[in-house]
Amino acid sequence: MSIRNYNKVLSMKTILELSDVKAKRYFLESENYCSMQFPKYIDFKPVIDYVEATVGNKELKDILKDSKKMPSDYENVNHKILVKKDAQYSYRPIQLINPYLYYLLVKAITNRSNWKNIKNRFDELTVPNIEVMSIPKVKGDSDKSHMSASVSAWWENVEQKSIQLALSYRYMFVTDITNCYGAIYTHTIAWALMGKEKAKEKREKPGLLGNMIDRYIQGMQNGQTNGIPQGSTLSDFIAEIVLAYADKRLSEELHNKGISNYHIVRYRDDYRIFCNSKEDIERIAFFLQEVLADLNFQLNGKKTYLTEDIISESIKPDKRAYISGGPIYRKSNKRIYSTLSNLQQEALFIYQFSKMHPNSGTLTKLITIFAQRLNSKIASCNDYLVLISIFTEIALYSPKSYKIVLSIISKLLSKVPTTDERERIVNDIYTKFQRFPNIGEIQIWIQRITYNLPHPISYTEDICKIVNGEANIILWNNDWIEDAYKSAFPQCKICTEWIRDRYTPIIDINEISLFDNNDYTY
């Protein structure tokens, strides 16, 4: 990251700097309703706008079909999409929150009084020795999206700050929380907003914001109190409330124990603790574990370690390996060129790198550069079947890369001379991915390049079925809502047909890249 970009990240506006009105609009934007990337023809704005227009200032009790039955009494109120996390059997359930509950929760949080109290509470929970990098960001004029603005503050920012802190501290302790969002005990949201004891005393008062958030989240997941839905900026923000409360409690505990010479950098549930005393940093780690355990969290032993080599360990292993091995991509006069002789060599290098560092950020960057370079070289590319095979295998074991891989494959498929042959290849690719069943996100993006083929693939993901124009598909269970508020619910309009029909099967890299101009060289 350049100094200019680093300074830009540090100066980004967070959502806490917005007024209540602007915060409400922020949360109700389609990209914040679901932070998962979709093809451009999938847009949740029509359903969000409909709910806002029909519900308006009404409360949950006003729209219930039966006053004795809450949303928590119903299953499948949210729509879940499984996202593969790694090459093994780990999945992340991304939830499209029921639009009615989502709107009501946003409305409650951004109520003028509530929003002021939340901002004040964050001020109270801010402590001098703990630096938080993960409050949702607001896109600036040069940002492609709110997501790109937030991602800019991700590991690059943490990395740069960590290297700086190596000047002042000898030791760094790195850890994170196991299944953070799935472990959040919904009652702790009220604890975070008003303190544990006060929250317990007032648990039965439904009008209090913490209790309202608790009730809405339980309504989304059949009454469960463990976990919050993943996949929206709103959930990210709610998690930050709980984690900021943990920061405050940890700071107080360390103050009481006489530990003051330390610095903590936190990005969501990832912690980097800096200290000059090995004894103190181990004590800090112990107290952190105690504080988190009281909030139903556990540290991830597999990602926990102590190091004296702060500079090396501040840089991700995949990035270190790429730098030390000699980068194959370099930049000259804003043009990226390769040190290898042809595209197949580049692809094989990337494949070998993916075996050593699957699902890594550097791998994603390498694939993105390849996709960009392919644009100008596709006309002379004759080994397209080999390249398709290589990149399919990469995506299979590095699921974070598959959208960019599908962009590459879509371009290579344009070289296949016949429609029948393209269909055969696409079906082979889909069959490969099918070894991991029920992966809705993969299906959504494979459909992007197969929709216009003569014999479309039959998908199990309901969003794909809506895109195909199938009838009687239900994403969200709305049986708990009075008919007057859902009679014209425009579920089918999440697919913008004219955009769907206009698209060619080729996915342009700009369609899936979070950034317009990335510096992919080191």
Image (cartoon, rainbow, N blue to C red):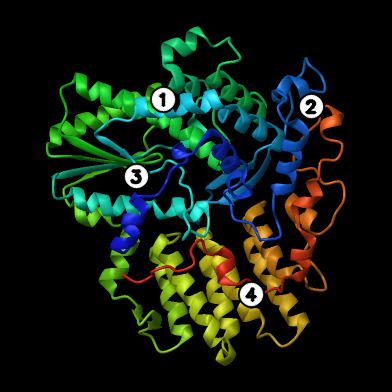
Residue drawn at x 29%, y 53% as measured from the top left: 159
Q: Are marks 2 and 3 in contact (CB under 8 Å)?
A: no
Residue 303: give its label.
3
Q: CA distance from mark 3 to mark 4?
A: 36 Å
- Where residue 191 sits: x, y (%)? 45, 19
170 or 349: which is nearer to us?
170
Evaluate if marks 3 and 4 touch, with contact meaning CB atoms under 8 Å apart: no
First in residue order: circle 2 vs circle 1: 1
Q: Residues within 10 Å of mark 3 (few under 14, many from 20)?
A: few
Tell me residue 306's x, y (percent).
22, 43
Q: Which residue is mark 4?
A: 410
Distance of label 1 from label 4 (alpha carbons)? 49 Å
Could you give the CA–CA distance between mark 2 and mark 3, rounded to whole angstroms? Answer: 42 Å
Mark 2 or 3: the one toward you: 2
Looking at numbered disc 1 in the image, what kind of residue is underneath it? Arg
Rounded to the nearest whole Å, what is the CA distance between mark 2 and mark 4?
Answer: 42 Å
Which residue is identified by label 2? 480
Of labels 2 and 3, earlier in sequence is 3
**Disc 1 residue crowd, few under 14, some 14–19, many 20+, Cα 10 Å:** some
Q: Is residue 498 left or right of residue 399?
A: right
Residue at disc 2, secondary structure: loop
* The N terminus - image quarter: bottom left
Give left or right: position of 378 versus 74: left
Q: CA distance from mark 1 to mark 3?
A: 31 Å
Type of the residue with mark 3: Lys
Query: Hey, what amino acid is under mark 2?
Result: Trp
